[in-house]
Image (cartoon, helix red, strand yellow):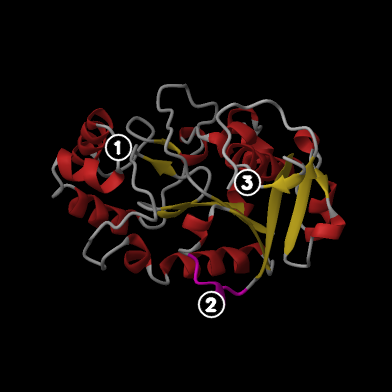
Amino acid sequence: MLTVISPAKTLDFETSKHTGKATQPQFLARAAELVEDARALAPDAIQALMGVSDNIAQLNHQRFMGWRLPFNKRNAKQALLAFKGDVYVGLQADTLDEAQLRFAQQHLRILSGLYGVLRPLDLMQPYRLEMGLPFVNRGGSNLYAFWGAAITDALNSALRKSGTKVLVNLASQEYFRAVQARALKAEVITPVFQDLKDGRYKVISFFAKKARGQMARFIIEHEVQEPDALKAFNTGGYRYNNAESSARELVFTRDTPPVNPWSVAI
């Protein structure tokens, strides 16, 4: 199977890398085009576009201005180790051994607004450019227009190389919208994670993001190759709910989520 996940806003370029292996992103030339377009934005324009604080806008302006090719191990970091949001807290990539990283490199892809598609060991420089932003660029009025069919074509190529026709969607809706589902030559399986709240099961953003990372970790650790094997996932107290599931949507429910005062039902 091939699995896709979203990137993260939170990054870690300070922690030492625990593997020396690294590869180059497929769409570096296209990423450079986006960076060139982004460099035309002043910090206040970035602030308005992203809805962020002045400090974060200044930081991302500096990132765009400092973005340079070629990528190497001194100026860039492997994507799976650089992202540190909720999904990656669940995935715990810094504890994967070399064999697990090799499996991930073959079977896991990260969707990205700037880089299009990243393999786990692809080098990247720090950035923030969410896929859903109305960022006007040379390809159109947003990043969906810029990437067009490129992301889908890359996933189809990875599916062929992996010898599979199953794609596990652990990405957010914002990022999976960049995939042209009708052109994707695979059966898409989407795991859904729900927690009991106010007497019914709901998707709670914080918990669901972490669970997507935990599911990705489960797939890597067990080298899962068949969709049915996903049903054995039980990390963090989740259990497969056959009654709520369908052929394309596997629902996992949990009755007693850990206390999280910042969680928001969606």
Pointer 3 or 1: first along the chain: 1
Q: Secondary structure at mark 3?
A: helix
**Discs 1/2, front:** 1
Query: Left of 55 or right of it: where is 196?
Result: right
Q: Indicate the position of residue 53 as horizontal and vertical percent values.
A: 27, 32
Q: Residue at x 38, y 70 (%)?
A: 148
Residue 11 colored in magenta in the image: no
Q: Badge 3: few (under 14), some or many (20 or more) residues near its Cα, within 10 Å? A: many
Q: Secondary structure at mark 1?
A: loop
Query: Left of 253 or right of it: where is 178?
Result: left
Residue at far front of view: 198
Q: Indicate the position of residue 87 as horizontal and vertical percent values.
A: 57, 39
Pointer 1 or 2: first along the chain: 1
The numbered mark at residue 104 is 3
Q: Indicate the position of residue 33 as horizontal and vertical percent values.
A: 24, 57
The numbered mark at residue 183 is 2
Question: What's under tag 1, amino acid-wise?
Answer: Val
Q: Badge 2: few (under 14), some or many (20 or more) residues near its Cα, within 10 Å? A: few
Label 3 close to label 1 by CB (< 8 Å) = no
Residue at far bottom of view: 182
Question: What's under tag 2, amino acid-wise?
Answer: Ala
Q: Which residues are magenta?
A: 179-185
Instruction: Give the CA distance from mark 3 to mark 1.
Output: 33 Å
Q: Which residue is mark 1?
A: 52
